[in-house]
Amino acid sequence: MVGLIGKKIGMTQVFGEDGQLTPVTVIEIEPNVVVASKTEETDGYAAVVLGSVEKKASRVTKPYAGQFKGDMAPRRHLVEIRDFDKECNVGDSFGVEVFGDMRYVDVIGTTKGKGTQGVMKRHNFKGGRKTHGSKFHRENGSTGMAAYPSRVLKGTKMAGRMGGERKTVQNLAVVKVDQERGVLLIRGAVPGTKDSMVLVRMAKKKR
Amino acid sequence: MDMIKAIEAEQIKDDRENFRIGDTVKVYFKIVEGKTERVQVYEGLVLALNNTGIARTVTVRKISYGVGVERIFPLHSPRIEKFEVVRPGKIRRAKLYYIRDRVGKRAKVKELIRSKKDQKAN
């Protein structure tokens, strides 16, 4: 599984050969450095820890700085990726060229916070009629049975805080890999705000 | 934001917006007919320019066999060859949607007569 840390820059459109406009998300891939590698023998599983975006050494705590061996500068984002398919040693760096031969990717990010939301927006409930004497508009309706169990089951979908959670969007087509700018153009939308961290990895279900 | 502009700048054609709202223009655009490609011309009045950057579009209206037809062209599309101003118009607003409700002579836009000095500037 190959994946890298990126930064969502924003969205735009790209013209195709036939004049078709494709909506794309621009993701900037700053150099991803291998901070540590885990092996079957020592850790029980194989993985690499990737770090991206340099941070001042004076801005990090000693335990955090201790993860970066030798004279490696601390990185803002750290992500562990299991079974990294590419051969690499600690200190190696990866960029957008990794996605050169990929047609589809999955993108993982933190969605925009929506605050407290009702049940229609949060869980796609249908709601009731707006007119014709209806007094049931956007409520959640019944939340359970009566005498037995005589309580609301845990996990029942209700209103509450929405967004700000980790979401994966699968099978997004790679439109362009711009090595010059270190930028990846991906078809469609990606979770999160502008400038937020996203993880771009090889699509699990589509080649 | 600058990164987005840089990516868009690659595809933007600077010489495309050589007309103004209210002008009557000819749009030369390529269409695919079976296997061959040919250029078709669409002539009409520019009602509006919308959006910015790569997404900029132009609305062109004409009357075809008594029926009003409006086409929205993406300004920077590679399918479009060029725009040609047939008749510059004199207008007082940025969107000419009021033309849609008018028929006959009232649906006309006055021609803009430019002084020779202005023409040189353009």
Image (cartoon, helix red, strand yellow):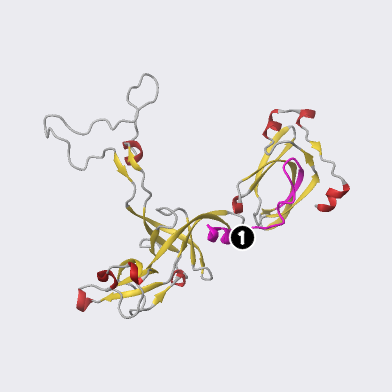
Nearer-the-camera pick, A185 or B80: A185
Q: Which quadrant would residue A70 be assigned to in this image?
A: bottom left
Q: Which quadrant would residue A56 be assigned to in this image?
A: bottom left
Inspect the magenta stretch and tell me whether residue B27 lies in it.
yes
Q: Residue at x 22, y 76 (%)?
A: A40
| Secondary element at tag 1 | helix
Seen in the picture, residue B14 relative to A3 is either above or below; the reply is above
Quadrant into which the C terminus of chain A falls? bottom left
Label 1, on which residue? B9
Residue A118's x, y, as percent?
32, 36
Seen in the picture, residue A80 relative to B84 is either above or below; the reply is below
The answer to whether residue A173 shows anywhere in this view is yes
Q: Check the residue under mark 1 and report the chain it is in.
A: B
Q: Which residues are magenta?
A: B1-29
Q: How dense is the environment of label 1, judged by Cα within 10 Å: few (below 14), some, or many (20 and up)? A: few
Give amino acid for label 1.
Ala
Inspect the magenta stretch and tell me whether residue A136 lies in it.
no
Nearer-the-camera pick, A164 or A200: A164
Q: Residue at x 40, y 61 (%)?
A: A206
Q: Is residue A90 left or right of residue B45?
A: left
